[in-house]
Amino acid sequence: MEIISFDSERIYTTMDRGVTYLNKRTTQQEIENLKMAKEHLSSKTTKINNNEYKIEIPTVHNWNEDTKIVKMDFFDGVNLEKMLRSTSSRTEAIIFLNKLLEFILLNDFYWVDFSPRNILINKENKKICFVDFEKGLKFKNNDLIQFFRNHVYEEYSSFLLLNERILNGEKIFKLQPLEKNITINKNEIKIKRVKATANKLNFPDIITQDQFLEIYRMFLIAELPQYTNNEIIFPRVELEKILETKKTNHVAYEQYADKIIELVKKHQKEKKIRY
């Protein structure tokens, strides 16, 4: 299994009687989400490139309430984000990602952690495994715009060019009529990278919903993959490396915000501001 994580200390493998298991420091809520996901997707399959793939959720074998460590199945597969970042597998990976986005919507599986990095593929065994359910899971959703705003679209789009996407972000991050009078206390924003960017933009203490969405639009623009010398560059990779230093770097979020603003200004100068 290939894991892409901000904190590799939280995820590790162990052997027990010749069997490999995945161990993760997590929450009780993720354990419940894993079990609900497994039940909801039991026996579900999806057809990709003329092959029928079984969708799997890791089985929970043990949960230690004291250490907050869960022991679950290890899945032998390739990380979809790594496939997207590789020229040799990228074309195929785009098909997988778009088909799996369609799959979760068709099956009312509103997985907040939907992301290429949380999808593992084993083409030999025709299995696909979904991992990471910390942020949330629902089986009914009356507001798809909010679902996609909650990191899902950003995760989906950051490794796809505009013409490779089956979902357009412009409608999702456009101010809705009922949101015109919504205001947000900047100091109460819990997402640190959003708050840092708001500060760098010199937004007032009370910001509008449109200003809040503007920050997310900036993230999407900054993360747009770019062709350079016939090679695709993924700005998200560099941005994530900045956040990986947050434990020892007290200005990591400020540096992240600076980089976002720098990339957006570059796109504006080149008249490439779509997302």
Image (tube, rainbow, N blue to C red):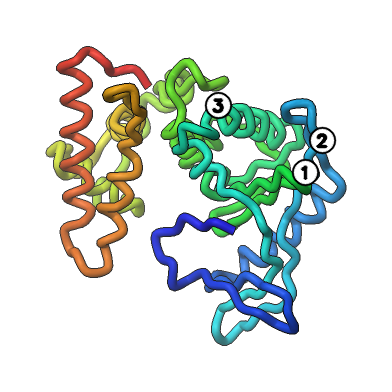
In the rendered structure, find residue 52 and report the number of the disc placed on it. 2
Which kind of residue does numbered mark 3 sit on? Thr
* First of labels 1, 3 by sequence position: 3
Element type at mark 2: strand
Between 152 and 185, the one lying in front of the other is 152
Which kind of residue does numbered mark 1 sit on? Lys
In the rendered structure, find residue 57 and report the number of the disc placed on it. none
Q: Which mark lies nearer to you, 3 or 2?
A: 3
Residue 188 can be seen, yes or no: no
Q: Is residue 92 left or right of residue 180?
A: right
Give the residue at mark 1.
126
In the rendered structure, find residue 91 and report the number of the disc placed on it. 3
Residue furthest top in the image: 271
Q: Are marks 2 and 1 in contact (CB under 8 Å)?
A: yes
User: What is the tally of numbered marks visible in this picture?
Assistant: 3
Q: Residue 71 at x, y = what percent?
A: 66, 75
Callout 2 crowding tier (Cα within 10 Å): few <14, some 14–19, many ≥20: few
